[in-house]
Amino acid sequence: YQKLMNEYFYYYISYIFYSTVKHSYTDFFTTSTGISNLPEFTIRLLIDDALAVYCDSNKTFEPQRDVEEKLFKGEPQLLEKYIQLCFERLPNFFKTTLNTLMKHLNQSGGVHVLQILLGCEWDENTGEVVGFLQYGYDGEDFILLNLNKLTWIPLKPQAVAVKQILDADEAIMKEFKVYLTEIYPEWLKLHLKYENNSSLRPVPPSVSLLQKTPSSPVSCHATGFYPDRVDMFWRKDGEEIHEDVDHGEILPNHDGTFQMRVDLNISSVKPEDWSRYDCVFQFSGSKDIITKLDKAEIRTNWGTRSEFRAAVIGVVVGLLLLSITGLFIWSNKKKMNGERQIRFHSFLENLFLSCRITHISFKSIHLKSVFILKE
């Protein structure tokens, strides 16, 4: 009975998840002080978690996908607005904000990083729009804006004093609300319109079996697929299983494609039973991709001592570069005081899993500092 209820619950949750079509528009802004040889600020626009536009203080403005190239050719007025936001409005405002934070936190110098997430989610079925704006300071959640009440919510004690200053500027809060709940959703729909009309065709994935250590779960990892409406699961004797299985999130790659993983805990699987298990990747309109659980096919990160040392050095250097440039991904979202709170995360989990720097998310390790690395 319990097993039946568990399966019912799983399918019920899956139904809710897949029956809701939500799209997101997110600006990820980073500005810093005390760091040389790096842009003074960077802005990354993500559409449905895929990098769409990049710009920085070096006057770099780069569409990252063919969709945006076509969009800006067809909508030159939108391009002008984006350029104005990238090089004038957002940098000027948030650099002033960084100076304000440092002043009221009694920080006269040193290395400090302000990260801002601002954007919206739009439900294609209901038309509901949810805007969000949150600051991260020196790698920690700092303060967020409650758009309904037009007030700032501190996420740590040091933000209480700053809240009073930000709350006093009601005009700015109202302007943010207009952008996040009216303007950004319209821009999002334009991106989606050109995406739907583009020549982007379904792209199948590359599927691999990965494992961190001999005792770790085996990850069935698919990457490079498009679009993101896919399913992947483990089977035993041809039947889908849920026990000892952990489903990872679908994450964007830098080229507009996606990746995902599904872990299988093999601690209770006898060696002679491995052949009874396989991983299935289902793609609309395509034949299922089936990967048998086979030790010979598993890619691992262990080996000789020198190989391991080289891998660790590569990971540490990569993490340092990623942290300095402020490339953090947020994956966990939760409600706080009636508003969405977004957790900042770094690229770690799949980096150790695949030993290469790709677009990676971590679910559990929360950043304590941007530069003293602790996803």
Image (spheres, helix red, strand yellow):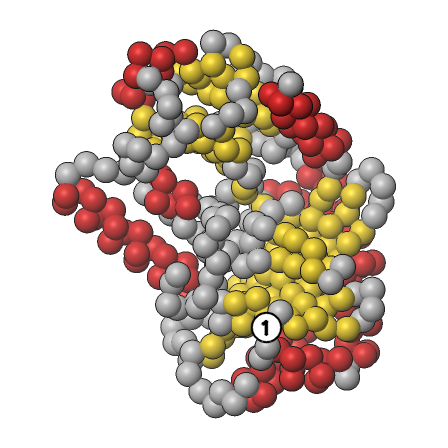
Q: Residue at x 71, y 28 (%)?
A: 12
Outermost residue on the front side: it is 1
Image check: 174 left or right of 210? right
Towards the viewer: 154 or 306? 154
Give me the residue at 70% from left, 55% from top: 335
Furthest-top residue in view?
Answer: 237
Judging depth in this view, the residue of 346 and 191 nearest the camera is: 346
**Amino acid, disc 1:** Lys
Q: State the image coordinates of residue 61 (x, y, percent, origin top left).
A: 57, 60
Q: From the top left corner, tell me how far across and down residue 88 is, in percent.
A: 65, 74
Q: Is residue 130 above or below residue 37?
A: above
Q: Residue at x 74, y 59 (%)?
A: 339
Label 1, on which residue? 156
Q: Is residue 42 above or below residue 275?
A: below
- Placement of 312 over or under 278, stated as above or below: below
**Number of on-image labels:** 1
* Left or right, residue 365 beside residue 5: left
Looking at the image, which is closer to me, 226 or 86? 226
Q: Quadrant of residue 155?
A: bottom right
Residue 59 x, y percent position in the rendering: 54, 68
Q: Secondary structure at mark 1?
A: loop
Image quarter where the N terminus lies is: top right
Front position in the image: 320 or 162: 162
Residue 298 can be seen in this image: yes
* Observer able to see residue 187: no
Q: Residues within 10 Å of mark 1 (few under 14, many from 20)?
A: few
The image position of residue 130, as x and y in percent, is: 77, 54
Q: Residue at x 58, y 26 (%)?
A: 231
